[in-house]
Amino acid sequence: MGIGTLPWIFHCEAMKKGKGLEERYQVQVAILLDSHLKLDEKLNELFKQAGLLFLYSDVGKPIIQHLEQADFYDQPAIDLAQKVSKEQPISFQITKLLSSNKAENQPTNYLDIKELQTFDLPNQDHLPFWDHDWITEELKELLFLQPQTIQKTAQKRDILRTYLILDAHIYTANNGVFDLDLVENLTVQCLYKGKAAEQLKYVAPYLIEMTLPENGYDDKDKVPDFHKSYFEKQWGNDASMFIRTTASMTTVHNHFRKFNKIQNDQGKSFLFRFYDQKILSPYLSVIKNWPERLVRLYTIETENQIHSITCSDGKNSAITFSPNPALLEFDYSTKNIRSPQQTDYDICLEIGFANQAKKLLIRLYKNLEKSHGLVPAPEHQKIATHTIKRMAAHGLKTPLFLETLIAWSLLLHPEFEQQDPENIMEQILGTSQISQHEKFQALSAQMQMVYGETI
């Protein structure tokens, strides 16, 4: 193959300078090359148009060679390479902020986040079952109403469709049986393919087209049985998210398959339960200030944006995340480009720590309210999360141990180990030759020495 057949991948460094501002970025570039002549000039012009100063680049590699020699599966490089063509032979993305002297400013919010009370359906025992409402008006409007601008058009492609991604394991637990392969009159597809779809059939995420049939919004007799069963048994108790977009089922399926896995810094892959509201809601709340991530999530195709993503926030409430005009108008060719400080893996770790802290705090309040006067306080969530994160770094991950460690942090000192005048507790935590149980027992003994009691 000639040098111009496939894109080359280069790793560069660039700088953004202004009044009192200096930021250095690590940048990945994909380019179709006829030759290496004047490459630096091309890169310099590319970065100049984006408000950046080109510093240097590596020697570069063809995309195939780059992927073969990378220590991990470089999906961002693949996505970048797919953007280049004869019409647009060069493209780039910032992969890391290396340094900055910029003071922290209030970040722009690119998502509109709204909470909605959906209430309970009124008692319908006095009505025959065929006259029962299947969903509250508030929730039906949120998930299925066609905007007036669409109602006036006759174009099927303009319909704002409704899709559901759900977790098969939790769905089956609520339903009593796995029947997603028996759903009638709706298109259902597993987000996994091949062997993964077969082996993980009963725990995998599934995409279901939930768009109501014609006149189904007003005529409950036209509503599919699956809809009625879902909102009776699943809503508020499952792990799922609703998507509203004009895109087709196939397009939506292909889009969200890209989010099935995330990678850590070592390139190891993990399944990403992005559709679970316990992860989805805090994840979107974290990335609401990062247009680079949001565009990747909310843009299915150039002409098909995701209108909204909605999940339950308990049985009688919902939370909706919609891109606002600031995201739709974001200009990637300007100096506004920033690099996320956290990877998706890092964010998910933080969410996991926070969710575990919530569960353990509930148990602690129940167990220690009478004996130690422990009652909920605003700062407890932050202290508990920090304790779990800190102890996990030292190999202490068992919930029973963490519950006690959090109690020490709340009742004695947020970083109790640093109060040891002889630093013995920090030495215990730093020891890697002993088991979790041995480490916890050693900590307990030293706590007795330092504080005169343990909890």
Image (spheres, rainbow, N blue to C red):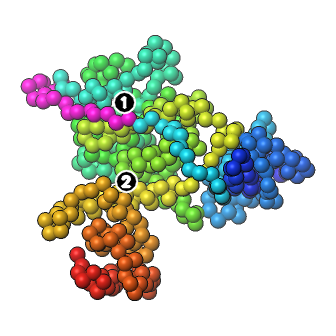
Task: Give the structural element (helix, strand or loop) at label 1.
Answer: helix
Task: Give the structural element (helix, strand or loop) at label 2.
Answer: loop
Frontmost residue, 290 versus 416 = 416
Query: Magenta residues, as a range?
Result: 114-130
Residue 395 percent across, percent down from the top left: 41, 75
Frontmost residue, 429 versus 104 = 104
Residue sticking out furthest to the front: 20
- Using the rendered view, name the quadrant where residue 64 is placed: bottom right
- Which residue is drawn at the image coordinates 41% and 31% (left, top)? 162
Task: Count neighbours of disc 2 (C-alpha within 10 A) and say few if under 14, some if 14 to 19, many if 20 or more.
Answer: some
Distance between the alpha carbons at the discs numbered 1 and 2: 25 Å
- Taking 428 as reference, is 380 above or below it? above
Q: Which residue is mark 1?
A: 143
Q: Which residue is mark 2?
A: 203
Residue type at mark 2 is: Val
Residue type at mark 1 is: Leu
Residue 333 percent across, percent down from the top left: 70, 38
- Which residue is drawn at the image coordinates 25% and 47% (left, top)? 174
Give the mark nearer the N terminus: 1 vs 2.
1
- Which residue is drawn at the image coordinates 73% and 48% (left, top)? 17
